[in-house]
Image (spheres, helix red, strand yellow):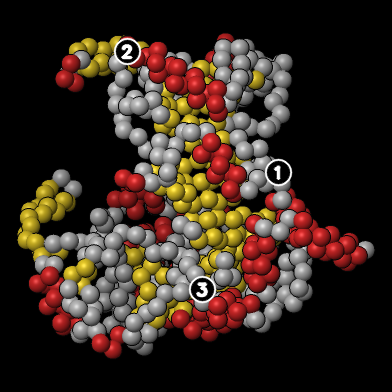
Amino acid sequence: MKKIISLLLIFTFIFTLTAFAGENEKMKEVLMSVKERIPDTEEFENFESTERTRNGITTYTFMWYNSGEDYREMSVRATESGLITSYNFYKNEKYENKPSVNKPETKEFLEKAKELSAKINPSVSDSIEVSVRSGYESLYDREYYFILTHKENGIPVYGNTGSLTIAADGETLTNYYMNYTEGVPYQKPDKAITREEAEKAYASEIGMNLEYRTEYDKRERKIYLSYLPEKTYGVYIDAFTGKAIEPGEATVETFGTVTEESAAADKAAGSVNSANRFSEAELKEFAKLENLISKEKAEKIIRDLKVLRDDKATLKNISTSRDYYDEERYYYSLSFEGENYYYASAKIDAVTGKVLNFYQDSDYKEVPEEDKEEMEKKINGYLALLCPGETGDDKEYRMTGENGNITSRNFTRHVNDIPYGNDRIRIEVSGSDGSLRSYSYAKTDVEFPSPEGIITKDAAAEKMFDLTEYKMYYYPVAGDEGKIKGSFLLYMLNESVEIDAFTGERILGYEVLEIPEYTDIKGHYAEEAILKLKRFGIGFAESEYRPDDIITQKDYITLLSYAVRRNSSIILAKEYDAESYYKSAYNYNIIDEKERNDNAEVRRIDAAVYFINALDLAEIASLPGIYNCPFTDVAEKEGYASILYGFGIVKGDGTGLFHPERGVTRGEAAVMIYNYLAR
């Protein structure tokens, strides 16, 4: 039955194409091209699309999703040529959110990442380099991340970068994003000057400045002398001429005009979804789009209002979007640019044509009190033009007090004589020429509950006072030249509290540390554990790990607070202030403040206690008479040692001894943390 309905919809769609040929035809062409390179869309119940034109370049965004327990979502953004610049896939599924070091390394999936990149954009795959993302991996990450770089002749293209993400299964593409400038010719670098020549050119063409600068260390300042580039941005050396040039501050356009050959290559790419038709959800979306006014009409609405200060301004961008809460509402966003850096923007309802937002550049000028009446006429004129009959003392939108600004007005929507702050009208005119400076209109299409049965204002106040402090404060008042001339004594609430109207209840320049290659762990029993922890950013910012040195209390406590309790990376410098780390440890009840002794050596029994405290198992570990401790030399704290043994975190010396008084080495600490995260 479903197939029959789909066929009928397809025939209906063919006739629709004839009747509504025009703006949406290109979108359908792009969508069909995209569908050949992404997973099947038939199983999705819903489909949405938006279109955006910026600087004359149009892009399309498509989104498929299912609601309910089987929630899935897939979205794609593509250029007119069919180049996919963004892809996202999300599936609602249960998984164990457990930190672990037992995960394959990202580099093991590099070849798969290259394959997926080539599959989604085959026409440009030869010019996109896929590499492993730098930095430390997360203990919680269930995906594998890669960097995309557009290169021509082995040289990166400025601004043309992206990312690719593979799911935990090592097969499924979950995210793809790529800035790619299409259709640009690239000169071969064989006639470029050498790096040495470019360095000399920089020295002569751009140069350096000698400056005094200040370094801050807490409350101390240190002046130092340094060289800085004469110009830090926007001026570069031409690789062919050796001259300094300013390419300008125009942003690299993500979207351009692709060659016919590459567009054809993507359309002819291997088909993931071979069905040459649209799904029911996609057809439903196109039917909605047919109800929208045209982009030309949207532009005409703004121009016909005669509110543009530069009536010859060019429409630079126009895009469509759908309301997040109301799937029947669509919007057009427009931006205009004119001479002398003139800029204006507008947002209108794409079905009704009602103006929702407007802004344009204008000079600021204070208006004298005697011109108040004239400004009032200007404001009322624009209100009559943009929202006729909606503002006034007896209307739905009522003025919100005097704001002291002669050139602007604010109105708040009232329902059942009760203000609704989310729905407002704001308007401002220019003090220079009375032109419209800005306007915004918001009206929520939602049912408002009746106020019948609410508690009184006095009752609400009593509830609030029960929930927060309300006490006296002196409030200083400044006079002329900012000098304090006196003060008020006021009662003030300690905090803002939101009360349910029916129930009365409350409604509620830093140093970057890295782990270097350790030079002293080769062949050590703790080598594997140390290197595994390093992969996840857990370790020391020193080339020597010193695995046989006894670990200090502050190092051990800090590692437990982050790696074990928070399951996050922690890199310790050779010298660091441990105050904040100890505060975290106090909050987690890992150690008592009275026990703090930063550089003290940590005994094995103390290490066991701190570790169990970090796992929040101290209460269980302290239960008497229930543990059969595997270590014959543990007379006290046997519960702590027993639980660590049960988790596989410690094993003893193999002879049944724990050596509770012996110090814990840095290598042993690494093994303990590794064993916990690898269990």
The tag on residue 248 is none
Which element is circle 2 on?
helix
- Compared across the picture, whether 303 is left or right of 168 comes to left
Q: Is residue 158 above or below residue 421?
A: below
Question: Mark 2 vs mark 1: which is more N-terminal?
Answer: 1
The reply to whether discs 2 and 1 touch (Cβ–Cβ < 8 Å) is no
Residue 469 placement (x, y as % from top left): 44, 21
Question: Mark 2 vs mark 3: which is more N-terminal?
Answer: 3
Residue 388 placement (x, y as % from top left): 59, 23
Mark 3 Cα shell of 10 Å, populated few (<14), some (14-19), many (≥20): some
Report the mark closest to the observer, 2 or 1. Answer: 2
- Compared across the picture, whether 424 is left or right of 488 comes to right
Q: CA separation, marks 2 and 1?
A: 46 Å
Picture residue at 39% right of the left edge, 22% below the top: 407
Mark 1 Cα shell of 10 Å, populated few (<14), some (14-19), many (≥20): few
State the residue position of label 2: 369
State the residue position of label 1: 328
Picture residue at 17% right of the left edge, 73% below the top: 243
In this view, the residue in front, 534 or 527, is 534
State the residue position of label 3: 258
Residue 615 placement (x, y as % from top left): 50, 58
Question: Mark 1 vs mark 3: which is more N-terminal?
Answer: 3
Which element is circle 3 on?
loop
The type of residue carrying mark 2 is Glu
Q: Is any atom of residue 648 visible in this view?
A: no
